């Protein structure tokens, strides 16, 4: 259950990716910079070779982390491949920019590398959104990766000032860089997502699913936007659609209940509990701090009257719609 926590999982995956990046990049570093005399072209080429495995490893581990937590080889491989490709490009571009800025501003410790590694983190974050085929997710994750890369890049030089042994300083700095990128991607995505579903019961208990697309398919198929493998889940069980500032859940080929009541179409409200097969999920709206307790199935639902203009439910005695002001 601990690995279903997106923030903690991203932190650990980023740190592991940084460690693996250091493990593969360190031999390259000594091969590329073993000579005391090298030109500008050799310097940039050596830096690009050194950064390549760092970007690849961070991209692979962060990309595969969710699939591994879900015990889905297909999702893990897809995420790892996308992370590998985009991470490799981001690593090379980021380190070249970092060295250029560092060279342009004499003695610019911290910020030169911070700017370069922020581009690297942006690319890693971008791969997270690409993996989910979500433009909104790519934007949010790229912003988080950019922030994490900048903070990690600033820490890179800071660690070098404290620890004089180059091998150890690069090891610690890259682990910190990966952890910063991982946790900032998860934090920014969580804050900016339009909503989320938290799994209360089922094989993925504790998992938080970010809703960052206008249409999401839920089901057993690993190609779905939301993959659930619990008993009773159909291949394409239900759909979530962005409607009226929230999400509507609509059954596809499976039965869906909300707060214990079977539904054919339901606009989700904060705290609503969704049941699909053996899985139970709670809906959290953007900016919600404490979910309300949904009405139990054995309690009578409050009597309301829908507005003729916007369909918003109002009290029976209301004279005007609370949403649009239409006379009832």
Image: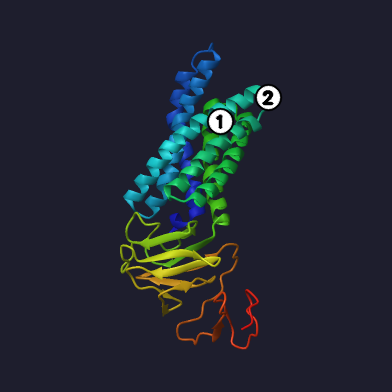
User: What's the residue at 31%, 67% (across, down)?
Assistant: 231
Task: Tell me the SS state at disc 1.
Answer: helix
Q: Quadrant of residue 203?
A: bottom left
What colour scheme governs how the chains and residues are painted in the rendered image of this protein? Answer: rainbow
Q: Position of residue 6 (x, y in %)?
A: 48, 54
Label 1 – label 2 distance at C-alpha: 23 Å
Q: Disc number at residue 169?
A: 1
Q: Position of residue 121 (x, y in %)?
A: 53, 39
The mark that comes first in sequence, 1 or 2, is 2
Residue closest to the eye, 180 or 189: 189
Q: Nearer the viewer, residue 151 or 237?
A: 237
Q: Residue under circle 2? A: 105
- Viewer-proximal residue, 241 or 310? 310
Q: Could you say which quadrant of the image residue 311 lies in?
A: bottom right
x then y, percent, for residue 18: 48, 37
Q: Quadrant of the N terminus?
A: bottom left
Expressed as whole percent of the image width and height from the top left, the position of residue 212 reads 50, 56
| Residue displayed at 38% across by 73% down | 256
116 with respect to 264 (left or right): right
Q: Is residue 294 above or below residue 181?
A: below
| Vertical placement of residue 32 versus 65, above or below | above
Element at label 2: loop
Labelled pair 1, 2 in contact (Cβ < 8 Å): no
């Amino acid at each position: 259950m601990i690995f279903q926590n997106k923030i903690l999982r991203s932190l650990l995956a980023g740190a592991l990716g940084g460690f693996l990046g250091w493990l593969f990049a360190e031999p390259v570093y000594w091969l590329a910079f073993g000579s005391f005399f090298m030109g500008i072209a050799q310097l940039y080429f050596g830096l690009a070779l050194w950064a390549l495995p760092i970007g690849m490893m961070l991209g692979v581990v962060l990309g595969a982390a969710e699939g591994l937590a879900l015990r889905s080889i297909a999702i893990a491989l897809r995420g790892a491949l996308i992370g590998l490709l985009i991470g490799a490009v981001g690593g090379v571009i980021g380190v070249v920019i970092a060295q250029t800025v560092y060279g342009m501003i004499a003695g610019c410790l911290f910020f030169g590398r911070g700017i370069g590694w922020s581009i690297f983190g942006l690319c890693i974050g971008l791969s997270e959104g690409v993996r989910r085929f979500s433009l909104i997710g790519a934007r949010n994750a790229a912003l988080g990766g950019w922030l994490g890369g900048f903070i990690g890049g600033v820490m890179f030089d800071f660690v070098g000032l404290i620890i004089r042994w180059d091998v150890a300083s690069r090891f610690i700095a890259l682990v910190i860089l990966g952890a910063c990128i991982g946790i900032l991607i998860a934090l920014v995505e969580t804050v900016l997502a339009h909503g989320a579903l938290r799994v209360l019961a089922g094989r993925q208990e504790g998992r938080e699913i970010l809703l960052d697309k206008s249409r999401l398919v839920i089901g057993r198929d690993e190609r779905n936007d939301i993959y659930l493998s619990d008993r009773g889940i159909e291949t394409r069980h239900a759909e979530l659609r962005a409607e009226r500032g929230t999400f509507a859940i609509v059954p596809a080929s499976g039965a869906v209940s909300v707060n214990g009541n079977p539904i054919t179409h339901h606009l989700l409200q904060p705290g609503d509990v969704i049941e699909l097969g053996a899985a139970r999920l709670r809906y959290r709206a953007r900016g919600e701090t404490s979910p309300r307790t949904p009405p139990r199935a054995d309690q009578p639902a409050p009597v309301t009257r829908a507005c003729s203009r916007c369909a918003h439910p109002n009290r029976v005695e209301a004279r005007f719609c609370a949403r649009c002001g239409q006379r009832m």
